[in-house]
Amino acid sequence: MRTVVIQPCAGDRLQFDVIELKPGEEILFGRSRTAIDARANIVIDDPAVPRVAGKIRAVDDFWTISNLSRNTTYNVENPEGGGEFIKIPPGRLNAPVPYEFSRVILPAAHPTVSFLVFAPQHVYASAVAVPGEQETLSAFPLDETAKYFLILVALCEPRLRDPSSPVIPTVPQILERLAGHPECAGLSRAAVNFHIDYLAREKLRVKEPSGGGRADWQRAALVSVALRFDLVRAEHLDLLPRLPRRR
């Protein structure tokens, strides 16, 4: 049976043991127990949490969350991702959560409380070849062994390490970051500019904003597209030279 597992976070003011929900089952969470099922409800001992704050429902290999509060927004974050999270506004019902591992965060008086939700491993379709059908082309045909991909990873590095970072590395900063990489010996400023232009025109096909834009629009657009479509991910940071340890 593909069950959704809910467990408290260590140290938070939660009164429940690990709970398993089968597909179709649901559970309430809030400040006080209700008459529906006092043994199964997630009780949050905090005066700022509504009596009945929300509901979780198991649906096959994912789950949904309902925000039953009147004026409080909840967050559901992916602890294994690069700062990914979704907002659940007041009154939102049955919002699907796409993460296999999630942390539900509620504003509280101390100042937040949270609990963990584990969904079953997601199911993915395998590629099926249809005789006589033309092969589907890649929308963004990137070669992860190419030098231009290293430059793209260096561009995305600040945002991968901190999703809220506004930093877009300059060409000199990219040269400094790739210094010492065996594939980048003799890399020049002109070469980096060439690879950035090649990525923008041929690989990710980004367009200049109408009416002109900032001088770094091309680099910013590359970072936006690469991260939006997971073309560059956290594991690609291993392609870059190791950062020196801070003392």
Image: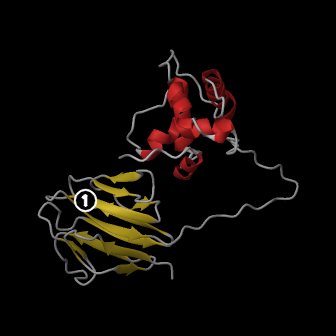
Which residue lies most toward the left here? 47
Which residue lies most toward the right here? 132
Specify the amino acid type for callout 1. Leu
In terms of secondary structure, where does tag 1 sit?
strand
Locate residue 8 relative to residue 127 in the image: left or right.
left
Closer to us: 188 or 39? 188
* Rendered view: 180 above or below 23: above
- The quarter of the displayed image where residue 32 is located: bottom left
* Rendered view: 38 above or below 10: below
Percent position of residue 182, x then y: 66, 41
Percent position of residue 53, x then y: 23, 64
Closer to us: 232 or 113? 232
Q: Which residue is mark 1?
A: 106
The answer to whether residue 213 is seen in the rendering is yes
Closer to us: 123 or 13? 13
The answer to whether residue 225 is seen in the rendering is no
Percent position of residue 208, x then y: 56, 22
Disc 1 crowd, CA 10 A, few/some/many (<14, 14-19, 20+):
many
